[in-house]
Image: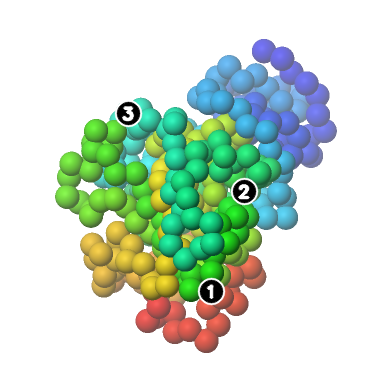
Amino acid sequence: MILIKKPVDTRPSEITPLPVYKKRREFIKTGLGLLATAGISPAVLATASAGYGGRKLDYSRMTEYSSKEELTDYKDITEYNNFYEFGTDKYSPAKRAKTLQTSPWSVKFSGHCEKPGSLQLEDILKPHALQERIYRLRCVEGWSMVIPWIGFPLADLLKRFQPTSQAKYVEFVTLKDAKQMPGQKSGVLDWPYVEGLRIDEAMNPLSLMAVGLYGEVLPNQNGAPLRLVVPWKYGFKSIKSIVEIRFVDKQPVSSWMRTAPSEYGFYSNVNPLVDHPRWSQKRERRIGEFFKIKTRMYNGYADEVAHLYSGMDLRKNF
Ligand SMILES: Nc1nc2c(c(=O)[nH]1)N[C@H]1C(S)=C(S)[C@@H](COP(=O)(O)O)O[C@H]1N2
Ligand SMILES: [Mo]
């Protein structure tokens, strides 16, 4: 185990990659909290005890786009998932998603654009510099996490295909293959999983194409190799394992709208003032914490996105 002294007031995640992404709590758990009280900063400690192991990514930090909140544990982010293609239970994706083949992977770009076509993942990634963005994810069920995503702006990807003026919306489609995704043998949703954004939502600088988290490639259960992250909307809008992106002129019907239109609308913006028909959306439980906290309008991203909805009735457009 190697200890390197760092100023105590420096936030660990601003100094070094992986090993330091550890939370104070974990140092205490491993008994190393004692070192901190002895004047040795816990900022940089050994990697050995962590549950990481994926391929490391090169990226830069986007602090102006990042939350300063305490990160959710890697273990919780990667072992408590919603990915119905691997079962409806939160713990089953981590156990079952190994059957997903993420390489080779290609994505088809179609619809109202000048340059449609299919691209291999490597060619999708090539022109984009990866960034880390620490975003809150608020599930419609009432729990939330703070996740250090690695990705690049969705807008930069979409512009490469030159959407035309008829591209009013963008539709995203997950892989459909019950051999790799055994949960698709169940009829709990209409497969493949589909999501959509209005084109201006998709082009908003917060919308991220994620390929990693905690400095490494995405674990399968988190939507490898390519997933959407839309931090001001309920988690289900952040579709995983994308194989097709379509530029369309009509509002797409997402899987959740199709399943329960009275409960899940197209917009699905995080909104503590509009309850889900069966439960309140006023509060949320941060995974790893005990007390509930208040849910914020647009999940706390109102400054960046409220203008997209000015003049809209958010009760009707839920
Ligand atoms: N294809 C697909 N994407 C999906 C889901 C899903 O079941 N299938 N679940 C959604 C829901 S409800 C949430 S809350 C987030 C969870 O992302 P995470 O497991 O990476 O935290 O993924 C979303 N994307
Ligand atoms: Mo969710």
Image location (x, y in percent) of residue 46: 65, 19
Name the mark on residue 99: 3
Query: Dividing the picture into quarters, in which one does residue 98 lie?
Result: top left
Query: Badge 1 is on which residue?
Result: 165
Which is nearer the eye, 287 or 317? 317
Quarter of the image with the C terminus in it: bottom left
**Separation (CA) of disc 3 from disc 1:** 40 Å
**Separation (CA) of disc 1 from disc 2:** 24 Å
- CB of mark 3 near ligand 1 (< 8 Å): no
Residue occupying image coordinates x 20% and y 51%: 188
The residue type indicated by label 2 comes to Phe
Name the mark on residue 117: none
Image location (x, y in percent) of residue 217: 54, 33
Q: Secondary structure at mark 1?
A: loop
Disc 1 crowd rating (10 Å Cα; few below 14, some 14-19, many 20+) is few
For marks 2 and 3 on the same chain, the one whose residue lies earlier in the sequence: 3
Residue occupying image coordinates x 17% and y 50%: 187
Which tag is nearer the camera, tag 3 or tag 1? 1
Query: Badge 2 is on which residue?
Result: 152
Disc 3 crowd rating (10 Å Cα; few below 14, some 14-19, many 20+) is few
**Separation (CA) of disc 2 from disc 3:** 26 Å
Which is nearer the eye, 30 or 108? 108
Which is nearer the eye, 279 or 156? 156
Which tag is nearer the camera, tag 1 or tag 2? 1
- CB of mark 2 near ligand 1 (< 8 Å): no
Q: Secondary structure at mark 2?
A: strand
Image location (x, y in percent) of residue 181: 28, 37
Q: Secondary structure at mark 3?
A: helix
- Is mark 1 in CB contact (under 8 Å) with mark 2? no
For marks 1 and 2 on the same chain, the one whose residue lies earlier in the sequence: 2
